[in-house]
Image (cartoon, rainbow, N blue to C red):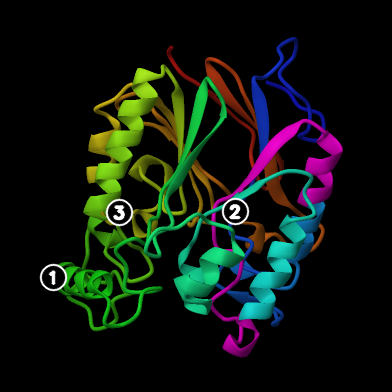
Amino acid sequence: MGSVNGWTSLQGKKPLFSFGVISDVQHADIPDGRSFLGVPRYYRHSIAVLQRAVKQWNHHGNLKFTVNLGDIVDGFCPKEHSLDTVSRVVNEFEKFNGPVYHMIGNHCLYNLPRSKLLPLLKIPSIDGCAYYDFSPTSEYRIVVLDGYDISAIGWPRDHPKTQQALKFLQDQNPNLDKNSPAGLAGIERRFLMFNGAVGEEQLRWLDSVLRDATNLKQKVVVCCHLPLDPGASSAEALLWNFDEVMALIHKYDCVKVCLAGHDHKGGHSIDSHGVHHKVFEAALECPPGTDAYGYIDVYDDRLSLFGTGKMENCDMHFNL
């Protein structure tokens, strides 16, 4: 599948619809730094990546919406500037000529509580939860999961979900620093404080949504800031209960693709049930003059990602 500058469509076929994608902008007005693994991070430049993305999305002219896979502001952003920084990045997204669908990531929650964050991101919410779904066409449904539903960050300290998460971490991670995977092996290395889980109520909601989509003969794309498959991500970035979520998803044939962020290097896998898992490369880790964003053409039998810069093209073909 070829592309010219990453912005051409699949030859000879018209998609059912197309949408823009970007992840992990993590903007902050602070000097460049590095991740705990030593990977360079360009906090000020990342908003320029977003600005170029919005310009390209608008130039495309046929994108139905855009999805932001989370973490629009960085945890190192000075807290007295959190609200202004989130607002500034949201304002850049709103220059896109269409709806923008956000999901929350850990860095968002380091900066603002859910009560302030969700209204800014226009995320429909009941009791502070951030999961929802929508149907851009009758053939497809997009499901957005709240990967920090059970989390030690974002909820008030005395909230039952915070307490549940802290107890879970105490049981699963022996380290004093709950963001350290030291001594944890394999996929157990996901039991870190900067990750989270999908709670029981959200699982029941997801089950009902997938049942409804099946009855309507809709194909489903699941979006979550945290990756759902070890083949597409490092173990340290996975959703705590990715296995439980995927067991539920695999009960149905309707889910064709899962999209995620969080693991900045990006990745792609096809799981044992033929579901594609695509993790997007981070806008934050683009040196000046480079980019990481794209758009996806959606067909009856595939999603075709056309990436710009560090975001790689990916043709996600599935069985009908």
Does the magenta run of residues contain 64? yes
Residue 89 occupies which quadrant of the picture? bottom right
Q: Earlier in the sequence, mark 1 or mark 2?
A: 2
Q: Which residue type does callout 3 highlight?
A: Val
Q: Residues within 10 Å of mark 1 (few under 14, many from 20)?
A: few
Counting from the top left corner in percent of width and height, residue 16 is at 64, 20
For residue 26, side relative to residue 205 (left or right)? right
At mark 1, the secondary structure is helix
Question: In the drawing, what numbered circle is on residue 266?
Answer: none
Is disc 3 in contact with disc 1, using a CB cutoff of under 8 Å? Answer: no
Question: In the drawing, what numbered circle is on residue 198?
Answer: 3
Question: In the drawing, what numbered circle is on residue 23?
Answer: 2
Q: Residues within 10 Å of mark 2 (few under 14, many from 20)?
A: many
Q: Residue at x 45, y 58 (%)?
A: 125
Cα gap from disc 3 to disc 2, whole angstroms: 20 Å
Residue 171 occupies which quadrant of the picture? bottom left
Read off the magenta span.
53-82
Does the magenta run of residues contain 81? yes
Counting from the top left corner in percent of width and height, residue 39 is at 57, 67
> Pointer 1: what residue?
171
Q: Which residue type does callout 2 highlight?
A: Ser
At mark 3, the secondary structure is loop
Q: Residue at x 59, y 61 (%)?
A: 121
- Judged from this view, the residue extending furthest toward the bottom is 80
Q: Which residue type does callout 1 highlight?
A: Asp
